[in-house]
Image (spheres, rainbow, N blue to C red):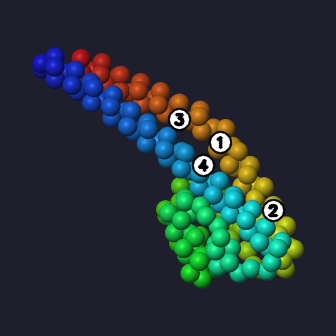
Amino acid sequence: MSPYLRIFGSVLIVLAATFVARGYSRYCEARLRTLEGFLSFLLHIKGEIKRTLTTPEGFVRDFKCEELSECGFLSAVGSGEPLHGAYLSSLPKLKMGVNARELLSEFFEGFGKDYAEGERIRTESYAQKLERIAESERESLPKNVKLCRALLLAGALGLIILII
């Protein structure tokens, strides 16, 4: 095998590892943005309940979040679908961990079954729980990204050594 071909293969392996690591970084950042989007949505709901008795369609009327729009959650709620149904329909497109998914599913499933003050307190409680999950994700994000990059580059270097 020619040395140029080996060098070219080595460069391709390093590039592939770098692109995979960047993709993982973007995915982790998108997970965090989605969590923060739902957290701000819960806080928005809490504020709306406090001010007026609003339907779920009214919650999304003046709420903007790119991640929740991309997954179809806001448009589903805006078209009159119940919060839990909208959440379930957008679930395949959501980039979130299992804990956050289960917590939000539990929240949306039980939403609207209490008086306004009870809903406000319940929403605040779930927002605090979601904030703890988001804080954990924020703290672990840099560590996870660095670990992924290190493992991928180490694997790439191992392959390069085998090729050469």
Residue at the disc numbered 3:
145
Q: CA distance from mark 1 to mark 2?
A: 20 Å
Q: Are marks 3 and 2 in contact (CB under 8 Å)?
A: no
Q: Is residue 8 left or right of residue 160?
A: left
Location of residue 119 in the rendering, given as x and y in whole percent from the top left corner? 81, 73
At label 2, which amino acid type do we have? Answer: Glu
Numbered disc 2: secondary structure: helix
Q: Which of disc 1 and disc 4 is earlier in sequence?
A: 4
Res. 148 visible in picture: yes
Q: Which residue: 83% across, 71% down?
A: 50
At label 3, which amino acid type do we have? Answer: Val
Residue at the disc numbered 4:
32
Q: CA distance from mark 3 to mark 2?
A: 31 Å
Q: Is residue 15 above or below residue 82?
A: above
Q: Is residue 39 above or below residue 107?
A: above
Residue at the disc numbered 1:
138
At label 4, which amino acid type do we have? Answer: Leu
Numbered disc 1: secondary structure: helix
Q: Quadrant of the C terminus?
A: top left
